[in-house]
Amino acid sequence: MEKKYQSKTFGLFKSMPSFSRGISRAFDLTGIINENNYNTSKTDKEADFNALKGDWEVVGNDLKTAIKNYDKE
């Protein structure tokens, strides 16, 4: 069974973090690589809402998958 990662889990990032990007950041003394890598929100409440919404969407998808797999058995 292939495991799919939920994109909502990494909602903070504009693009998925990678090993090579992490290594390159260690040598980036100016901090240029770190710019524009993260999604931002206008307020703290908006950021919390989006994070909580994404978490519950992932939970809902997991439950849907579990129910579908249970029905197959």
Image (cartoon, rainbow, N blue to C red):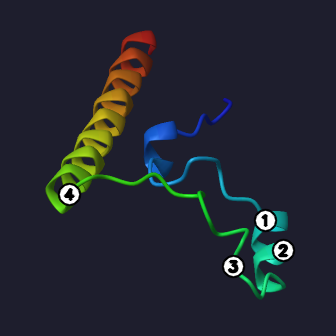
Q: Residues within 10 Å of mark 1 (few under 14, many from 20)?
A: few
Between marks 1 and 2, how big is the CA–CA gap? 5 Å
Q: In the image, is 20 to the left or to the right of 48?
A: right
Foreground residue among 41 and 18:
41
Please name the residue shown 36% across and 37% down the image.
58
Tell whether label 2 touches label 1 (CB within 8 Å).
Answer: yes
Tell whether label 4 touches label 2 (CB within 8 Å).
Answer: no
Foreground residue among 28 and 19:
28
Residue with the mark numbered 4: 43
Between marks 1 and 4, how big is the CA–CA gap? 28 Å
**N-terminal of the two: label 2 or label 4?**
2
At label 1, the amino acid type is Arg
At label 2, the amino acid type is Ser
Q: For the N terminus, give its image quadrant.
A: top right
**Helix, strand or loop status at disc 1:** helix
At label 3, the amino acid type is Gly
Tell whether label 1 touches label 3 (CB within 8 Å).
Answer: no
Which of the numbered marks, if any, corresponds to residue 31?
3
**N-terminal of the two: label 3 or label 4?**
3
Residue with the mark numbered 2: 24
Q: Residue 10: x, y in percent?
A: 50, 50
Residue with the mark numbered 1: 21
